[in-house]
């Protein structure tokens, strides 16, 4: 995107509500497009799709739609070639797949794995498989992970109908599961890991679900909230504990022993994002208003300090590194989205 010589380093968007969930679009024809989810402590919440206008170099809201409860996560379909329909997924009470049109976004399907119950166990997170975009995995407070298969059905009146079915559901942890992420190892389709309230990181293989591998357990058994796989080297992943001020880097070849601890934050860490194009760079963001970029190639020697630091005007809730535009990182705090050129 040529911003006509006005190449700014930071662009800011102010939403009408606190921003929590956030994700970059990956389609090649939709650069600088992000989805934002509101965090309002009531039933009625919103999702906004925003984009950077080339002419004015300002963010504009292209579309707003209603969402029941806050979105715990938002993801665009990982379709770098633009061959699938323009889909967006959200998690909250259920997993929902939305189809984005020029003027409106409509619900394509609602994936519910609790057909026999009047109650739903809220979904804490989900991941969309990059190698096979027909696969999604959700994590739930009911201790399970569910792997979903999507079908893009036959064309009816030039509209592909999208539907989904449960491929498998497994009890992943002893307590609530807080995050799930597919690994790029072994072809990128079958391996995934999860973290949860029992303080463990567990690894699964869809081809051998009868057992899992515990990669790490928090020494104090603090709940682990997030996990994030290195985008270039599938041996490494990062995780963080609830209310923890450090990010732990793990190597699956050396279970249970962190290879690095990133601990410069002065308040609890809320987000982790690996660089899409480099195996040794990672960004962490926290309640201390800071987004820090680290170079971890010294591992296993201690990583003392970040190589870049940005101080925002509020506690940073989320950080996302644009997979198809590796020069840009997005953060959100209060009601603001900012994208930063790195």
Image (cartoon, rainbow, N blue to C red):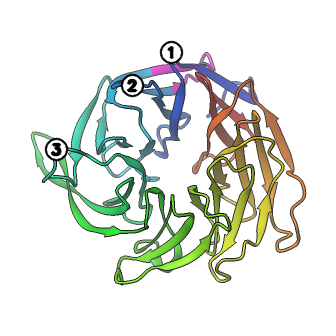
* Label placed on residue 46: 2
Give the numbered dot on residue 130.
Answer: none
SS for dot 2: strand
Identify the residue at image location x=66%, y=49%.
326
Q: Is residue 9 magenta?
A: no
Q: Which residues are magenta?
A: 51-61
Spot occupied by residue 336 in the image (x, y as percentages of width and height): 61, 23
**Mark closer to the observer (1, 3):** 3
Q: Is residue 99 left or right of residue 15?
A: left
Q: In the rendered structure, are the residues bearing label 1 and label 3 in contact, judged by CB atoms less than 8 Å apart?
A: no
Distance between mark 2 and mark 3 Cα atoms: 24 Å
Residues tagged 2 and 1 counted as in contact (Cβ below 8 A): yes
- Above/below status of 201 relative to 19: below
In the image, which disc is placed on residue 118? 3
Instruction: Tell me if mark 3 has few (under 14), some (14-19) or many (20+) residues whose alpha carbon lies within 10 angstroms of its own.
Output: few
Image coordinates of residue 338 in percent, x first then y, are 65, 29
Whether residue 276 is visible here, answered yes or no, is no
Residue toward you, 126 or 325: 126
User: Is 226 on the left or on the right of 154, as rendered?
Assistant: right
Identify the residue at horizontal 35%, vertical 62% (top origin).
144
* Residue hosting label 1: 16
Q: CA distance from mark 2 to mark 1?
A: 10 Å
């Amino acid at each position: 995107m040529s911003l006509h010589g006005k190449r700014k380093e930071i662009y800011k968007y102010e939403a009408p509500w606190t921003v929590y969930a956030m994700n970059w679009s990956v389609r090649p024809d939709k650069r600088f497009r992000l989805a934002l989810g509101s965090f309002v402590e009531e039933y009625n919440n919103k999702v906004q799709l925003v984009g950077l206008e080339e002419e004015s170099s300002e963010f504009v809201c292209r579309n707003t739609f209603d969402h029941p409860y806050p979105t715990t996560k938002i993801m665009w379909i990982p379709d770098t070639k633009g061959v699938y329909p323009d889909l967006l997924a959200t998690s909250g009470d259920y997993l929902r797949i939305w189809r984005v049109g020029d003027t409106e976004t409509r619900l394509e399907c609602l994936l519910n794995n609790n057909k026999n119950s009047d109650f739903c166990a809220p979904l804490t997170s989900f991941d969309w498989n990059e190698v096979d975009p027909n696969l999604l995995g959700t994590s739930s407070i009911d201790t399970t992970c569910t792997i979903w298969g999507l079908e893009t059905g036959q064309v009816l009146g030039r509209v592909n109908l999208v539907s989904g079915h449960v491929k498998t559901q497994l009890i992943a942890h002893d307590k609530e599961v807080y995050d799930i992420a597919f690994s790029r190892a072994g072809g990128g389709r079958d391996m995934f890991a999860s973290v949860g309230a029992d303080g463990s990181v567990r690894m699964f293989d869809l081809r051998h679900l009868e057992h899992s591998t515990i990669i790490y357990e928090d020494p104090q058994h603090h709940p682990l909230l997030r996990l994030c796989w290195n985008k270039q080297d599938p041996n490494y992943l990062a995780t963080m504990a609830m209310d923890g001020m450090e990010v732990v880097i793990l190597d699956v070849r050396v279970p249970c022993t962190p290879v690095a601890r990133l601990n410069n934050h002065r308040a609890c860490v809320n987000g982790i994002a690996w660089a899409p194009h480099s195996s040794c760079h990672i960004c962490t963001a926290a309640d201390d208003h800071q987004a820090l970029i680290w170079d971890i190639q010294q591992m296993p020697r201690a990583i003392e300090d970040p190589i870049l630091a940005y101080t925002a005007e509020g506690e940073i809730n989320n950080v996302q590194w644009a997979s198809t535009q590796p020069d840009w990182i997005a953060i959100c705090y209060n009601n603001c989205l900012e994208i930063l050129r790195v």
